[in-house]
Amino acid sequence: KYFKKAIKVKPDYTNALLNLIDAEQSSGNRAKAVGLCEEFLQKNNDIEIRRKLLELLSTGCRDALDKASHVAESLIGCGDEDNKTRVELGRLIQARTALTVNA
């Protein structure tokens, strides 16, 4: 609430926006946090907000890869004989490894 008020008074107040983004992320509202970054960056060129956006998107990618890997593993565990599932699981594992190593 206070961060929103600070942003209304000074729309380019990066620290207030970063705190609001962190609050949204902590509340489980990653999509809202990403939206706040993207909206701000349409009007402002701010390196800290760009870094935060990268962090949010990268974390989201890792989470999505983990979920997709679990689904592929469960398909294989249920007897799915489709080789495409195994190939896709391999790709997911490679992508997750690349994101983890470079993080």
Image (cartoon, rainbow, N blue to C red):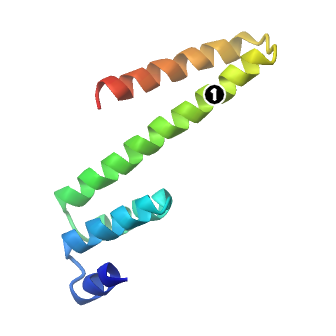
Which element is circle 1 on? helix
Q: How many numbered callouts?
A: 1
Instruction: Tell me where residue 81 appears, x and y as whole percent.
Output: 79, 10
Q: Where in the figure is residue 48, as x and y percent of width and height? A: 20, 57
> How far from the left and from the top, in percent, is residue 71?
68, 29
Residue in the image at 46% along x and 39% along y: 61
Q: Which residue is mark 1?
A: 70
Which residue does the image show at 42% across and 60% down from the upper left?
26
Quarter where residue 17 is shown? bottom left
Q: Is residue 37 above or below residue 66?
A: below
Q: Estimate the x, y position of residue 5 in percent, counting from the top left.
A: 31, 87
Label 1: few (<14), some (14–19) or many (≥20) C-alpha neighbours in 10 Å = some
Q: Which quarter of the figure is the C terminus placed in?
A: top left
Q: Which residue occupies the extreme front position in the image?
A: 26
The residue shown at (46%, 57%) is 30
Q: Is 53 located above or below residue 89 in the figure? A: below
Is 13 displayed left or right of 78 in the figure?
Answer: left
Q: Residue at coordinates 53% horizontally, 23% vertically from top-left?
A: 92
> Would you identify the image quadrant in which residue 18 lies?
bottom left
Amino acid residing under circle 1: His
Residue 44 left/right relative to 23: left
Compared with residue 47, is residue 81 higher up or lower down, i.e. above or below? above
User: Split into 4 quadrants, where in the image is the N terminus?
Assistant: bottom left
